[in-house]
Amino acid sequence: MTTPLDIKVNVARAKAAAVGAAHGVTPAELAELEPRALEILSLLRGERAAAKYGFYDLYKDDAAFAGVKEKAAHFAKFGYENLVVLGIGGSALGLTALQTALNPPYYNLLSRGKRRGPRLFVMDNIDPVTFKAMLRLCPPKKTLYNVISKSGGTAETISQLMIVVDQLEKALKGAPLADHLVVTTSPRHPDAPKSLLHPVADTYGLVSFPIPLNVGGRFSVFSPVGMFPAAMLNMDLDAMREGCAAMDARCSLASLEENPACLRAAFQYLLDTRKGKTMSVMMPYADGLRDVADWYRQLWAESLGKRFGLDGGEVFAGQTPIKALGATDQHSQVQLYREGPNNKVFNIIEVAKFGTTLKIADTLPDVPGLGYLRGKSMNRLMAAELRGTMDALKASARPVIHVTLPVLNAHTAAQLLYMLEVETAVAGRLYGVNTFDQPGVEEGKIIARRLMGGEG
């Protein structure tokens, strides 16, 4: 049973009936894959029940959500002007997606009375120019820092922390750092590797949030990684939990057609392996979702891009995810998408009803040919641009998976993120790879560490 807030997935334009059998999924191919997909759903249910993968049930953790709300209320009393998150990859991208989706545009430029909380700065890189500019904009006495790293050994994040601790010690002159610094890292557990952030938390008596051991960074947005900063920004955590629950119910259905995550995974997998669609473009037609596409890039690439399969053999699996933005990238990428190599599947994301309506003024009477715009709305123009792009892609035999959010809010944004996480888990099993590791990332880290004089 669907509700008015349920997001919709439409795969009609990715079927052979729409774009031809050379480029779209045929009924026979879907029927052939269905038993395997349903077997994977059953397998994942069993592994979830055994707590092998924790991302499924993060939204159910009452204690974790109560903890982040309590501490956010505590720190809110200090009236910070800035919240600075020190983290990279999964420690940054989920929160950034929520910030863009759920807070007003130009949030940091709004006056304090019009903002939900402090200004947000997510420091997800180590460019010295950018980081130094943040330090100038965010005086330590007026700033709360949240350092996020499961191991505590992430070189980029720990180097940021070392600079921040130095700045805090100089500015606070003996006042407690615990009023300005929060840690999110692995739990203190006999079976858990010790985090390098544990002694930091102990030295300064810091509030510390645990990242569950069975949750990887790119699947951690609904853990304290994303939820504590979200609480500091007064986002609606309860609505997010409800959105996760609603999508969890749908993604638990043992049905290829009715389970949106399974359906999307099956189509993307078939389009890649049977139709040569080696690239997956995510193109939301809403500025609020532009950073969801950025978050999804890591989720899809790091989870599926694997040299070795679960059986140990070489597979070199994975689609290349590409981020785009409608209507902006109609003017920068769609020429290639329509007339370049037919090696892409397009994930078009629509927001059916924007949070505001903006009329196009009935003006410029001396300019001919503008009658089709006068008196209309920018909302209607955006919808027309989206439909025009989908129809043009169809005319060029390019497959499209269309996702529609009725509105963009905490409930629907959580549905979208949760669905994409489950989709990725299903897709990993279809490809026969370990969705939850990232061995290809580690060698570069080891080389960088050695170049800096570290061991390894």
Image: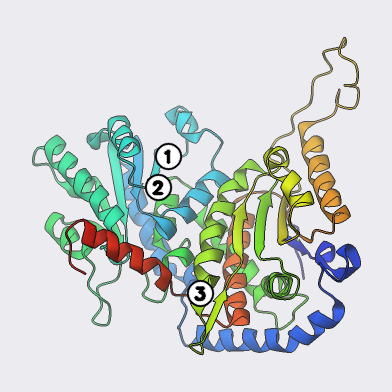
Where is residue 35 shown, x and y percent of the image? 73, 89
Question: Do tag 1 and tag 2 residues touch (Cβ < 8 Å)?
Answer: yes
Q: Residue at image x 44%, y 45%?
A: 233
User: Between disc 1 and disc 3, whose residue precedes?
Assistant: 1
Q: Secondary structure at mark 2?
A: helix
Under tag 1, what secondary structure?
loop
Neighbour class for label 1 at 10 Å: few (<14), some, many (≥20)?
many
127, 200: nearer the viewer: 127
| 444 displayed left or right of 403 | left
Which mark sits nearer the N-terminus, 3 or 2? 2
Give the labeled residue for mark 2.
232
Q: State the residue lying farthest toward the left.
A: 174
What is the x, y in percent for residue 111? 45, 27
- Residue ID for mark 1: 117
| In front: label 1 or label 3 | 3
Locate the C terminus and report the quarter of the image it occupies. bottom left
Residue name at image x 55 percent, y 58 percent: 297
Give the Cα distance between marks 1 and 2: 6 Å
- Could you say where residue 6 lies in the image, as x and y percent from the top left? 72, 61
Which residue shows up at 75% across the image and 79% down it?
256
Q: Amino acid at mark 1?
A: Gly
